[in-house]
Image (spheres, rainbow, N blue to C red):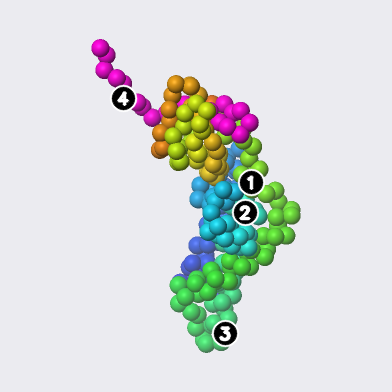
Amino acid sequence: MSLLADHNLPFAAALLLMLLLALFQLFSFGGFELDADGDIDLDGDADSGASAAGGLLSLLGIGRLPFTIWLVLFLFVFAGIGVSIQGLAENLTGGPLYAWLAAVFAGGGALPVTGVLARPMARILPADETSAVGLDSLLGRRGTIITGHARAGSPARTRVPDRHGHPHFVMVEPHEPACELQEGDVVLLVRREENVFYGVPLQERELAPVT
């Protein structure tokens, strides 16, 4: 059975994407960093719904491995299961399944299998770096005030993505005591004292007319 046959095209495409991601991952070890911007926030302050989603993702192996490696593993398993399904269907019925139907079956089977395989791989490979990002690494990054108004002595909750795109939620006060930060303002984190960050606003303010 040819991998390039029409009924196997989803699995051939998955293998091609897997190879491209593997090459990017190799480049990342040489200094080229592939960020996973689509990663999901599992912040400790998330609500119960987010916690349940985090538990499901962990069961599927997401978070146990760096996301790019998890995706490479998933694509490999997806392609292997898909080609096997088509081969079995051809042996049993004399013809393969529709490509989209085989892809649905393969995707449904690949998710739990990937979760099982991710567990032993996680013991060998380093965990996703973003799970161990230090607070100081957020200095110099931009954040958005999401709850409340920040003023001197009264910090506001701020969403700050780390260098991998993972969001962190920290408390931020204005760097200048006379400044006040409003909800929705974008700030640059410039210093930290224990668990409180200090930021300066980045959006342009309308200047008061000269009198």
Q: Residues within 10 Å of mark 3 (few under 14, many from 20)?
A: few
Name the mark on residue 188: none
Q: What amino acid is at disc 4?
A: Glu
Q: What amino acid is at disc 3?
A: Asn
Residue 52 position, x and y percent, is: 57, 60
In this picture, residue 13 sits left or right of residue 80: left
Q: Residue 99 magenta-drawn?
A: no
Q: What amino acid is at disc 1?
A: Ser
Q: Is residue 81 visible?
A: yes
Q: What amino acid is at disc 2?
A: Gly
N-term-proximal mark, 3 vs 2: 2
Separation (CA) of disc 1 from disc 3: 46 Å
Q: Which residue is mark 4?
A: 206
Q: Residue 196 magenta-drawn?
A: yes
Mark 3 secondary-structure assignment? helix
The quadrant where residue 92 appears: bottom right
Quadrant in which the C terminus appears: top left
N-term-proximal mark, 3 vs 4: 3
The quadrant where residue 64 appears: bottom right
Residue 33 position, x and y percent, is: 57, 41
Q: Which residue is mark 2?
A: 63
Residue 77 position, x and y percent, is: 60, 66
Q: Which residue is mark 3?
A: 91
Please give the range of residues in magenta: 191-211
Separation (CA) of disc 3 from disc 2: 38 Å
The outermost residue toward the top is 211
- Say which of 90 and 121 sits in front: 121
User: In front of the other: label 1 or label 3?
Assistant: 1
Separation (CA) of disc 1 from disc 2: 8 Å
Q: Are marks 1 and 2 in contact (CB under 8 Å)?
A: yes
Mark 1 secondary-structure assignment? helix
